[in-house]
Amino acid sequence: MTAMTSMTIVGHKVDDLLEKPINNGKSIEPDGNACWFPRSIQDLDKCHHLSTKYQPELDKNHPGFYDKEYVERREKIAELAFGYKHGDLIPRVEYTSTEIETWGYELEYSLAFRVFQCTQYIRHSSTPVYSPDPDVAHELLGHVPLLSDPNFAQFSQEIGLASLGASDEDILKLSTLYWFTVEMGLCRENGQLKVYGAALLSSYGELQYALSSDKPERHLFEPEKTVLLEYRVDEYQTHYFIAESFEDIKGKLRQYVNSSIKRPFDILYDPYTQSLNILNNVETIEDSIVKFKLQINNLENARRRLEEENNYNKHSKVTKIPDEAKT
């Protein structure tokens, strides 16, 4: 089983990744007369389709604005994505020779359910080094390697879980955190500055800029400061944030969510049913505790057996008698 399931969709903007419903700035109460949010992975089919605000037919600065064939091609791929429902086979796209040539150039509700919304179209052939909007190169080169790591996949899921029932203001802050970590994050490894953000990994031009240029400012990742910054998706960034490790950003995210994201309930994800448990009554909480205790007991029993086997093997080894002592 992969760390994060991939779901075909036409496109995403980072705050749309959290797929927030409109809630007029108020937090959502799961059992009150408030806005709906998904409780199971199947409910994602009821969420709105995602699209970027930086569409080729809408923005004249987009490299595909004057390319009618490219716009029609993206719409055709979008139709395949919009028809997808949970449980269906993921539709396959037959790429054109131009798309293959471009591809060969060297170079947040759904997150709560460990589902990642991804694209299938390819960037315009005139800009292979940098794409202002996400494409299949961005998904496969940028997101897939990191989402295959369970620890990083959990970090992405926690951003999605934090968004459920949050106010519009808090969701905007979470999307900003997502942008400066999952998309544009830098990290240190053995004292060397490296890239882990998907947007940087899939953009050779900005990757060099982020690591080597003296133009952008680089800061240690601090959620309280990061959420205050605005960002643009159609140009290189002016700020980047550095993580000491994935555990570092996960710990800081959890601390920020617990202290800053206000909602009248807590949520627990059930990986067996791929659904959410709303922890708003004692019975549900106690039932969850019992399930976790059972899992902990199973793990402790497994560890105990391994320790006993190791001790037995250690003490039952036969000492070999030296040849000179056999006479």
Image (spheres, grey):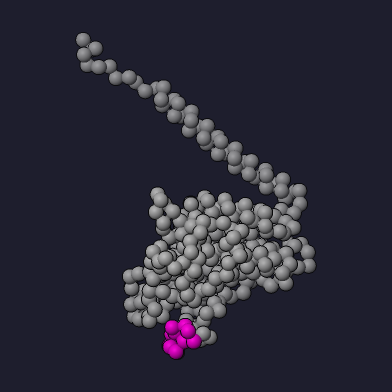
Task: Determine whether 211 is above or below 97 in the image.
Answer: above
Residue that appears at 51% across and 59% down: 219
Which quadrant of the figure has residue 50? bottom right
Residue 238, position in %: x, y?
Answer: 49, 69
Looking at the figure, which quarter contains the C terminus? top left
Q: Which residues are magenta?
A: 60-70
Q: Kindly give the residue lying farthest to the right in the view shown.
A: 33
Residue that appears at 25% across and 17% down: 322
Residue that appears at 58% across and 67% down: 229
Residue 43, position in %: x, y?
Answer: 63, 67
Q: Nearer the viewer, residue 158 or 60?
A: 60
Q: How many marks?
A: 0
Q: Is residue 214 visible?
A: yes
106 relative to 155 in the view: left or right: left
Task: Determine whether 224 is above or below 313 in the image.
Answer: below
Which quadrant of the figure has residue 156? bottom right
Q: Nearer the viewer, residue 186 or 45?
A: 186
Residue 251, position in %: x, y?
Answer: 57, 50
Task: Determine whether 250 is above or below 77 in the image.
Answer: above
